Image: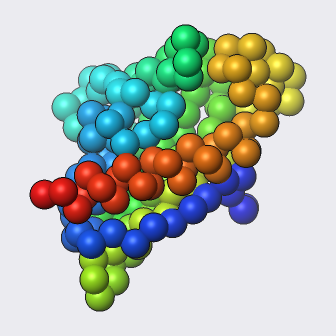
C-alpha cells in the first residue's frame, strides 16, 4: 500500500547511528515536527511489540497517542499509532546503507476511520493530514540529518 506521505534524505552517518536516533523516544522527539517525546510502557527501550505513550504538539494543541513497535532493526523502525483506542496511523523509517552513509526514508499511512477524521481536525487543527504530514516529514528528515551528522 502506498504511503500517504513519504520523503527521503541522504545522511553522512552510519545506519546504526540513524537507527539509534529514530528508535529513541527522546532522539525522535528532538527531530520530529509534531511528536515531542514519549515514555516506554512496560519496556525500557525499543523492540517488536514494545509500546510507548507519545505526546504530540501543534501550536497550543497537544494530544497523546499510544504506539506499538512493529519493526525494529537497523534497516527499519516502524510503529502503529492509536488514539483513544483507534488505529490512526503507521510511521516507518527505512534506513539503507549507501557509499557515503545511508538514505533514510520516512513514510506514514493514515489509518483513521472516516467518521473519526473531523474529531482529529478539531483536536490537532490539521485539515489536510496528508499535506501536513508531507511537510512534517521533510522538516523531520532535515533535523534528523543534522543530528546524525553532528556527532
- In this rendering, the answer to whether 79 lies above or below 102 is above
Residue 26 position by quadrant:
top left
Instruction: Give the quadrant of the C terminus.
Output: bottom left
Task: Please provide percent x and percent y for residue 114.
Answer: 86, 30
Residue 119 placement (x, y as % from top left): 77, 15
Residue 123, relative to residue 33: is it above or below?
above
Residue at the image position 35 percent from the left and 25 percent from the top: 38
Q: Residue furthest right?
A: 115
User: Where does the image place residue 107, in percent across and percent down from the top left?
Assistant: 57, 55
Q: Quadrant of residue 97?
A: bottom left
118 left or right, relative to 132: right
Residue 124 vs residue 76: left or right?
right
Residue 148 picture location, percent across and down:
25, 58
Residue lying farthest left? Answer: 151
Q: Is residue 84 visible?
A: yes
Q: Quadrant of residue 150?
A: bottom left
Q: Residue at x 28, y 83 (%)?
A: 100
What residue do we see at 45% from left, 67% from top? 9
Q: Nearer the viewer, residue 76 or 47?
A: 76
- Looking at the rendering, in which quadrant would you find the N terminus? bottom right
Q: Between residues 137 and 96, which one lies in front from this camera angle?
A: 137
The reply, left or right, for residue 45 in relation to residue 5 is left
Q: Out of 97 and 128, give the one closest to the viewer.
A: 128
Q: Is residue 61 above or below residue 128?
A: above
- Asked which colour scheme the image uses, the reply is rainbow
Residue 85 is at least partly visible in this image: no
Picture layout, residue 131 above or below residue 62: below
Amino acid at each position: 500500500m502506498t504511503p500517504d506521505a513519504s520523503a527521503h534524505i541522504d545522511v553522512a552517518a552510519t545506519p546504526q547511528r540513524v537507527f539509534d536516533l529514530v528508535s529513541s523516544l527522546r532522539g525522535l522527539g528532538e527531530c520530529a515536527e509534531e511528536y515531542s517525546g514519549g515514555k516506554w510502557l512496560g519496556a525500557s527501550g525499543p523492540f517488536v511489540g514494545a509500546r510507548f505513550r507519545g505526546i504530540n504538539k501543534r501550536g497550543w494543541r497537544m494530544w497523546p497517542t499510544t504506539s506499538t513497535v512493529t519493526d525494529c532493526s537497523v534497516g527499519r523502525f516502524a510503529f502503529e499509532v492509536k488514539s483513544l483506542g483507534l488505529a490512526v496511523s503507521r510511521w516507518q523509517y527505512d534506513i539503507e546503507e549507501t557509499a557515503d552513509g545511508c538514505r533514510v526514508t520516512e513514510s506514514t499511512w493514515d489509518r483513521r476511520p472516516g467518521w473519526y477524521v473531523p474529531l482529529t481536525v478539531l483536536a490537532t487543527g490539521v485539515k489536510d493530514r496528508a499535506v501536513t504530514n508531507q511537510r512534517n516529514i521533510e522538516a523531520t528528515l532535515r533535523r534528523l540529518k543534522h543530528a546524525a551528522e553532528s556527532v
